[in-house]
Image (cartoon, helix red, strand yellow):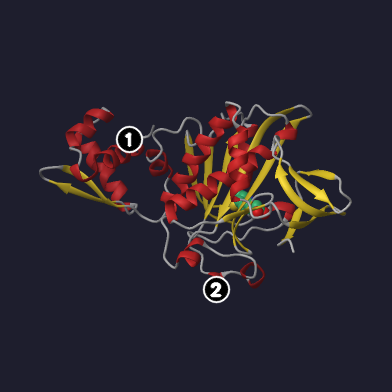
Amino acid sequence: MSPDTRILRALREAGEGGVSGAALAKDLGVSRAAVWNRIEELRRHGYDIEASPHLGYILRGTPDALHGDDLMARLPRNRVLGRDIRVFTETTSTNDIVEKLARDGVAEGSVVFAETQTKGRGRMGRQWFSPSGSGLWFSVLLRPKLRPSSATQLTVLSAVAVVRAIERETGLKPEIKWPNDIMFGHRKVAGILLELGAELDRIRHATLGIGIDVNLDPASMPPEVREVATSLSHEAQRPMDRAGLATAVLRELDHLYQRLGEGDFHEIGDDWMRRCSTLGRRVAITIGDRRITGRAEALDDEGALLVRTDYGTVERVIGGDVTQEKLP
Ligand code: BTN
């Protein structure tokens, strides 16, 4: 753990009570002057840290910019996700960086955020609009013990984690649209892109990319994006705390990933079904040049969507693009 993570963690734990320079110096094994230097550096990054003669240092405010040290400081109990968190000012796609970490043999749980992506990508080869400082664009490196055919479980789990975190942090209630779009009505607020490094029977690594439109003004979106997208700040009509939401998502993801590892996909799938607007609806799903129409009925044990087609058969669907309508 870096010195800044330790300082920020100690400040958060101490709250209004403050933490003394002497205690921090002892914890870090450095002089009080060295602690003071780190505090000054954090202040330069926008952390509002009061030095009280009686109580010591008190954290009064944090900047909107994301900092890996601070995000890690906020996740003391995470088991896997967030062991290492890096924040880039700009990158092509956070999935590219994580892909590289995976090839370098880095352990699972590393998370990469970018304030902006120049080549953010979505599903089906689409671009992902990722303007600076207003969203959460991040990717997680996982090495799950799953067969490639069960990889959909990871996107199901992630959609549940994102929705739970949004609810907890903002009070808003988004829904999930198959396979993993997070929606308010017919507008999308967040998306998930899972990319796999796999052999026939084994996932070597999974790169889980998540994009959440947090404080974007729809007026600033390109017209084709504005038609289908929204943001949390627009839905709630107030700005949102990006770092708070980021840590809430990572906490939920860590918890659900552990449940998945313990074989508890059922519960996660049940929660997904409760939050999913696609089930019970008439759907048309396009997969390449194939089109399936019917009624979306349930999620199966591997995370695939079960659709009762117009011919009465049941199809297992694990991807594709969905249009959905209310049943007449
Ligand atoms: C989709 O709904 O089409 C998936 C969108 C995924 C976007 C995120 S942003 C962080 C990560 N990096 C990318 O290039 N894409 C994902």
User: Which mark is drawn over residue 6?
Assistant: 1
User: Which mark is drawn over residue 219?
Assistant: 2
Decide which of 56, 295 is in the foreground and name it.
Answer: 295
Decide which of 96, 260 is in the foreground and name it.
Answer: 260
In the image, taking residue 51 as reference, residue 85 lies left or right, namely right
User: Which mark is drawn over residue 282?
Assistant: none
Counting other residues with Cα less than 10 Å from the Cα at mark 1, is it few (<14), some (14-19), or many (20 or more)?
Answer: some
Mark 2 touches mark 1? (CB < 8 Å): no
The amino acid type of the residue labelled 2 equals: Ala
Q: Is mark 2 within 8 Å of ligand 1?
A: no
Q: Is 140 placed above or below 124 here?
A: above
In the image, taking residue 228 as reference, residue 244 lies left or right, namely left
Element marked by disc 1: helix
Q: Is 291 placed above or below 139 here?
A: below
Q: Does the residue labelled 1 lie within 8 Å of ligand 1?
A: no
Counting other residues with Cα less than 10 Å from the Cα at mark 2, is it few (<14), some (14-19), or many (20 or more)?
Answer: few
* Residue 90 placement (x, y as % from top left): 54, 53
State the quadrant of the N terminus.
top left
In the image, taking residue 51 as reference, residue 328 lies left or right, namely right
| Distance between the alpha carbons at the discs numbered 2 and 1 | 40 Å
Specify whether residue 258 is in view. Answer: yes
Of marks 2 and 1, the one in the foreground:
2
Q: Tell me the residue at 41%/55% (across/down).
A: 241
Decide which of 177, 226 is in the foreground and name it.
Answer: 177
